[in-house]
Amino acid sequence: MVLRGKKRTVYALPNIINPDLHDYINAGVITPADRNYDPRIDKPLANPGGIDLVAQLLQDRARI
């Protein structure tokens, strides 16, 4: 997906096939944390459907 401004590319979202964490980081979809995980502070959100949220985000962006 490529977004263009006046005669120039503003942003290009690369197509990622079989992505891993580093592909998402390189694409700018994920930003690594500044600190390590601390179970006393960090509580994961429930995902009862077991959906890969990042993959879903990329699919939604591809449809736009």
Image: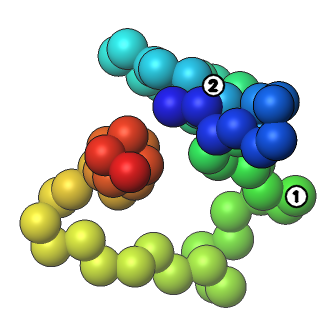
Q: CA distance from mark 1 to mark 2?
A: 16 Å
Under mark 1, the amino acid is Asp
Q: Nearer the viewer, residue 24 or 21?
A: 24
Residue occupying the point 67% across, 85% down: 41
Under mark 2, the amino acid is His
Secondary structure, mark 1, is loop
Give residue 21's position: percent from left, percent from top.
55, 31
Q: How is the image coloured?
A: rainbow
**Disc nearer the start of the sequence (1/2):** 2
Q: Nearer the viewer, residue 61 or 50?
A: 61
Residue occupying the point 87% across, 58% down: 34
Numbered badge on residue 12: none
Query: In the image, is 29 to the left or to the right of 64?
Result: right
Instruction: Tell me: residue 42, above or below residue 22.
Output: below
- Dot 2, crowdedness within 10 Å: few (<14), some or many (≥20)? few
Give the number of the mark in front: 1 or 2. Answer: 2
**Location of mark 2 (residue):** 22
Q: Residue furthest right?
A: 34
Q: Nearer the viewer, residue 44 or 6?
A: 6
**Location of mark 1 (residue):** 34
Give residue 26's position: percent from left, percent from top.
71, 27
